Image (cartoon, coloured by chain):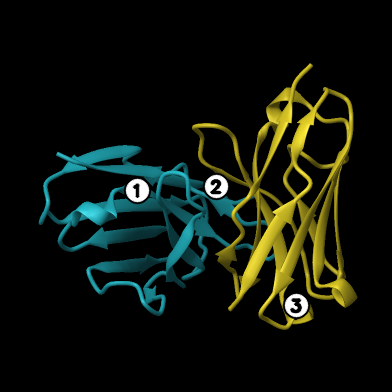
Amino acid sequence: EVQLVESGGGLVQPGRSLRLSCAASGFTFDDYAMHWVRQAPGKGLEWVSGISWNSGSIGYADSVKGRFTISRDNAKNSLYLQMNSLRAEDTALYYCAKVSSGWFDPWGQGTLVTVSS
Amino acid sequence: DIQMTQSPSSLSASVGDRVTITCQASQDISNYLNWYQQKPGKAPKLLIYDASNLETGVPSRFSGSGSGTDFTFTISSLQPEDIATYYCQQYDNLLPHFGGGTKVEIK
């Protein structure tokens, strides 16, 4: 069974950093691109960042460019999101997702990031 | 960046009704359009990929159509378990975008 489990969320003050992790199992991790998508409370889905299977191609939403860094460790079947200079508007549930030919499937259960003083 | 305009933002329909949601891309995206269902408190679930292909295990009352810039998602006969928010999503290399979502409720 394909499974994605996010961790690392929590309450953090504005301007501080946080590192999210996504542990993957049940599929050949280094065959697939992986992405992060977030959802602010009561809002829609917002794509955050994506990384190709070999880390050769990386993309970021304009809202996080220069502050967030995506990475992966294929040996550990893990995806990461380093979030620096956090703002109140980064408060959201962060999902990781496996991407096959452009569609997101499956998604993890999400990890909640709250940015507040 | 390619932007996605999804409408309506919400709708209310009766059980058994046909429900239609549209998604418009700001430029030609061929058939690179996917649809997701998100129930309250749950992660999104893929329903339709590449505009019209039904994901394995998804009931046949769900369907998708369209190409280029205009796409349609249809529930042929709304069921109580279909109460959810539905999102379209385009994939442009490593810059995907989601539509704003359509919240479907039972009248």
Local packing at callout 3 (Cα closer than 10 Å; few below 14, some 14-19, many 20+) is: many
* Labels 3 and 1 share a subunit: no
Cα distance, mark 2 to mark 3? Answer: 29 Å
Residue depicted at x 82% and y 66%? A57
The location of residue B30, given as percent across then percent down, is 49, 69
Rendered-image quadrant of the N terminus of chain A:
bottom right
Q: Which chain is yellow?
A: A
Q: Residues within 10 Å of mark 1 (few under 14, many from 20)?
A: some
Near mark 2 (Cα within 10 A), the count class, few <14, some 14-19 or many ≥20, is some
Q: Position of residue B70 (x, y in %)?
A: 38, 58
Q: Residue A105, percent across and down?
A: 56, 68
Which residue matches tag 3?
A29
Asked whether residue B8 is in view, the answer is: yes
The residue where tag 2 is placed is: B3
Horizontal arrangement in the rendering, residue B100 relative to residue A5 (left or right): left
- Whole-number angstrom distance, CA of label 2 to CA of label 1: 23 Å
Specify the label residue B21 is tagged with. Answer: none
Residue located 72% across and 46% down the image: A61
Dot 2: chain letter:
B
Q: Amino acid at mark 2?
A: Gln
Residue B68 seen by the camera: no
For disc 1, the marked residue is B84
Find residue B51 and report its image quarter.
Answer: bottom left
Amino acid tagged 3:
Phe
Which SS class for mark 1? strand
- Looking at the image, which residue sits at the far top? A117
Total numbered badges shown on the rendered structure: 3
Distance from disc 3 to disc 1, alpha carbons, whole Å, reads 30 Å
Q: Give the colour in which the image draws chain B.
A: cyan
